[in-house]
Image (cartoon, rainbow, N blue to C red):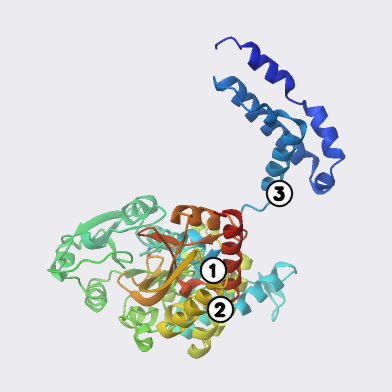
Amino acid sequence: MMPLTATQKEMLRKLPGVDRLLELADRDAFFQSVPRSVLTRSIRTVLDDLREAIIGSGRRIDTARLADSAVMETVRETADRSMAPNLQPLVNATGIVIHTNLGRSLLATEAVENLVRIAGQYSNLEFDLQRGKRGSRYSIVEDLICEITGAEAAIAVNNNAGAVLLALNTLAKGKKVIVSRGELVEIGGSFRIPDVMAQSGGIMVEVGTTNRTHLTDYEKAVDEETALLLKVHQSNYSIVGFTREVSLQELAELGAERGIPVMEDLGSGTFIDFSRYGLAKEPTVQDSLASGIDLVTFSGDKLLGATQAGFILGKPEIMDRIKQNPITRALRIDKLTLAALETTLRLYRDEKKAVAAIPTLRMITEPVEAVEKKALRLKAMLERLDTERMQIDLVRQTSKAGGGSLPLLELPSRGLAITVKGISANRIESFLRRFSPPIIARIKEDRYIVDPRTIQEEELDIIAAAFQQLLNKDKP
Ligand SMILES: *Cc1c(COP(=O)(O)O)cnc(C)c1O
C-alpha cells in the first residue's frame, strides 16, 4: 500500500469518530425511532466509505463532506434506507399482467381478507372439526378443485416446479419417462425439464425432433422400463411452420393400451376458456383431464390468479402414492397460501364473479376500450402538471399475459408515450423506479412508455405525484 500523503492524513484526522456521531445522533429526533444496532451499523458503513474514498482516491475529496453535519446527513440516509422494508409494493406499468419479477398475480380482495384472517388466528389447518381428530391440510382445497375441474383427486403443493418434481419422483424414479424433443423447455427462473427430470430420478427418453414428433416415435420408445409418458406445455415459446405434435388424446390412448400413466405439465393452467372473451384458445385444465390422461400439473399464481402453488390432479390411486411420498412433506403448502387459494377457488364456482374479482383475469380480459379510457384519464392528470415541458401521446401497443402463459397472445392495448423537455427517458425511468412506491415501466425509442392495463385505478395518482416531484426537482 502506498504511504499516505499529508493531505490524506489530515483528512482522516478531520473525520468525526464513532462516539462523536453517536452523541450527535442522541440529540437528533430522527434517530429516536432508529434501533441502536441500525444506527451503529450505519455509522460504521458511512465512515468506512469515507475512509476508503480518502485513502483510495489519489484526488482530494471535498472536505465539506467530512464535516459533522454532512456525515450525519449521510448516516441518516443510510439508516433510513435500512429501515425501509426490502419487499415493498410497487406500480406495474409494464402491461405484462403475470410479471414473474413483479410478483406474478395479485390476489382478489376476498382472498387477501381471508389470508389476513387466518394469519392472525389459530385455525383447523390439520384438525377435523367433525370427528374431533387430526385432519389433513391437503383436504382443505381438494374437493373444491375436483368440483371445478372434474378431477377425481388433487393435491396442492409449494409450486408447479415442485408438483412436477414430486409427480416424476413418485411415478418414475429409476425408470424411463418419454418426452418429445419439442417440449424440453426452460421456464424463467431456472426450471428446465431435463434438470427437474434428473433430480426426480426419472430417466429421460427423448423422442421426435424439435419441430415434429409423431405417435410412432412414442410407440417405438415404449418398453418394459417405461413408467410415464410426459407432455409439457411449451409455455413461453412456440414452434411454427412444419410442425407436428401428438395430442393428449392420442397419448392417453397409447398409455391406456400399454398400461403406462400419461402426465401433462400444463404450466399455467386455467379453468376458464379465454376464447369466450375474444382471446386465443388456451387449453384448460378441464380439457386436459377430459382427454383421458392420468395426471396434470399447473401453477397457482399464473393464469389461475391465486398465490404461488402447484397442483397435481388425477387418478386417486396415483394421487395416493403421491401423498405418501416423503418429498410431499418437503413441498408442503403453507397455511397462508391455503387461505388465499381456498377463497380464490370458491370464486371460480361462478365464472362471471371470478373474472370480475380475480385481478389477473380482470386485467387480461379488460377490453382495449377500457384500457384507453384509463390511459386518457392518466394523460389528463399528467397534462395538468406542466403542458410546457411534457409531451404525452396516446399510442397503440400490445400488453402481454406474461408468466409463460398464453405465449403468443398479445392483448391489444393503449399506452402513453411520455417525454419531458430537458429530462431523458432514462432519468424518468430511474426516478420513478426509486419513487415511493416504485413505478416500473419501459423505455422505447427514448420515450417513457406506460401501459395502463396493469395499473390499478388508485395508482394513477401515484404516477402523477411522481412526475410532479420529478418536474419540481429537475427544473430547467
Ligand atoms: C411456469 C411453469 C413451470 C413452473 O411453475 P412454478 O409454479 O413457477 O414453479 C413448470 N412448467 C411449465 C410448463 C411452466 O410454464
Distance between the alpha carbons at the discs numbered 2 and 1: 9 Å
Q: Residue 34 at what x, y percent from top left?
A: 79, 46
**Residue type indicated by callout 2:** Thr
Q: Residue 243's spot in the image, x, y percent?
A: 15, 69
Would you say the residues marked 1 and 3 are in contact, meaning their CB atoms lie under 8 Å apart?
no
Whichever of labels 1 and 3 marks the residue nearer the N terminus, that label is 3
Give me the C-alpha separation between circle 3 and circle 2: 33 Å
Which numbered tag is attached to residue 29? none
Spot occupied by residue 191 in the image (x, y as percentages of width and height): 38, 55
Q: Secondary structure at mark 3?
A: helix
Quarter of the image with the C terminus in it: bottom right
- Image point 73% across, 22% down: which residue? 14
Q: Earlier in the sequence, mark 2 or mark 1?
A: 1
Q: Using the rendered image of the protein, determine whether residue 264 is visible from the camera's viewpoint.
A: yes
Query: What amino acid type should be assigned to the residue bearing mark 3?
Result: Met
Q: Secondary structure at mark 1?
A: loop
Which residue lies under the disc numbered 1? 307
Total marks placed: 3
Query: What label sits on residue 344 in the rendered view?
Result: 2
Furthest residue in direction right, as rendered:
27
Q: Where is residue 301? Give x, y as percent.
A: 49, 69
Quadrant assignment for the N terminus: top right
In this picture, is 279 found above or below 425?
below
- Horizontal side of residue 400 vs 438, given as left or right: left
Which residue in the structure is indicated by mark 3?
83
For the question of whether residue 271 can be seen, the reply is no
- Amino acid type indicated by mark 1: Thr
Q: Is residue 66 left or right of residue 203?
A: right
To which quarter of the image does residue 12 belong? top right
Proximity of marks 2 and 1: CB atoms separated by less than 8 Å: yes
For residue 107, side relative to residue 192 (left or right): right
